[in-house]
Image (spheres, helix red, strand yellow):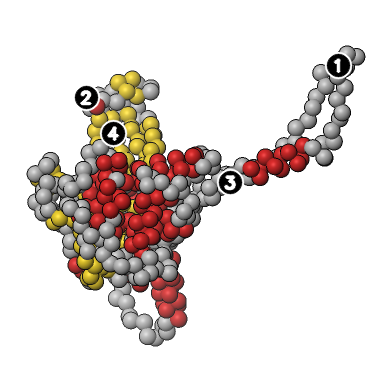
Amino acid sequence: MRPPGGPGLPPPPPALRERASSGHASGPASPNSPQRTPKSPRAGAPLALAATAAALPAPPPPVRVDVAFPEGGRAVGVGLTNLGNSCFLNAVLQALAHTPPLSNALLARRGDCCGSEACAHCLLTAQVAASLAPGAASPSAPRALFRALPSLARTLTCGRQEDAHEFLRALLDAADRGRRAGLVGAGRPPPPTWATEVEAAFRGTLRSRVTCGRCGAASDTLDPFLDLALDPGPGDIAACLRAWAAPETLAGGDAYACGRCGPVPAAAKALAVSSPPAALVLTLKRFKGLYGKDARHVALGETLTLPPAVLASADGPPPTYSLDAVVVHSGSSAASGHYYAFVRGRGGRWWRADDSWVSPVDAGTVLSSCAYMLFYVHDGGKAAAAGKEAAAAAAAVKATASPAAAPARERTPPPLPVSPA
């Protein structure tokens, strides 16, 4: 799956083709064999095939990726009641509801899944719909997902402070599995290229390249990802991405066996984004064990352009993203503290979603926070288009400027000749 404005969604599966069956004689008929009344292929086979094709449920259509804030609902989602150490759950649900590629896809196909109370996809869809529904009472209590915590992952327990990133991954994985299982149970198995709503929003592709230190041959492996985990460091989020993509040496116990050279004493391994997702989730690895935390501030911007060093291909302009949600952990360790979220609502306005309370904030407050998880949404090429428009406008102004009004330039004298020694 690739985002709009750059690469597109996977093509839909080919249409179902009807093929009429035909009988082939294996030889002359025996005199004692029963005589069969020949059937007209126009009278029998097409009717049977038409009935069979009509009885087959239609496969699911491709998921449409829409990066605009959902229309027809609230300007910002409702607050969420804390059900007992459930701030981690509330913060993640707020971020997901305000990530348009996911919320639009879930709302557009609402009711298309199995409707089971054990299906994480159905529970997530219902929660997003309740959060953004016009006239919804605030706060809302996400009890169904709270009760489902142990079924999402055996490590999650109701009433205990859990890690927001662990809950995010467990929820997305369970929602993806539930969506596919619901389609299979309804007799509508999706084609291999079909992406669920979760995959259409968050799935990208990573390229892992290992380069032999002896012959220089490279071996590539492609894997899907739903989020990237970065080490917080000095500088901004782009610097953290460049550090993530920096090559590491494989040696010792991690020694690499080259297809040409066999085991080599050293090789270089580097990660890169091969297919960027529609919604890019970046998690800063803040926690050091159970009782430690790296609270260094990482500079953020409301927009992010993926650095060229992070991309597997240099073809075309690098993808640009807009920041839509931030999950923050306040506290000294993973064992204590509090989670809340900053979310961007309709019209680009920022809000602080802190359990039951949702209040407006300025962008400076969001960008100065000690972010834990960042939710970026592909801008569909708007930044690149704006850059081209600005360059064209500047060129037009320069072309129409009067030569008399142009400031005089100081001529630089040519360099002096150097005498041979």
Q: Which residue is mark 3?
A: 58
Q: Nearer the viewer, residue 34 or 222?
A: 34
The answer to whether marks 3 and 1 mark residues whose Cβ atoms lie closer than 8 Å is no
Instruction: Check disc 4 and report its element: helix, strand or loop.
Output: strand
Residue 129, percent across and down?
38, 60
The residue type indicated by label 1 comes to Ser
Query: Tag on residue 33?
Result: 1
Front tag of 4 and 1: 1
The residue type indicated by label 3 comes to Ala
The residue type indicated by label 2 comes to Gly
**Reading the chain from its start, which is encountered first: label 3 or label 1?**
1
Q: Which residue of the protein is positioned furthest toward the right in this rendering?
A: 31
Residue at 36 percent of width and 58 percent of height: 128
Residue at 43 percent of width and 75 percent of height: 393
Q: Which residue is mark 4?
A: 268
Q: Which residue is mark 2?
A: 253
State the separation of the CA atoms marked 3 and 2.
51 Å
Instruction: Check disc 1 and report its element: helix, strand or loop.
Output: loop
**Reading the chain from its start, which is encountered first: label 2 or label 1?**
1
Query: Tag on residue 405?
Result: none
Residue at 66 percent of width and 45 percent of height: 54
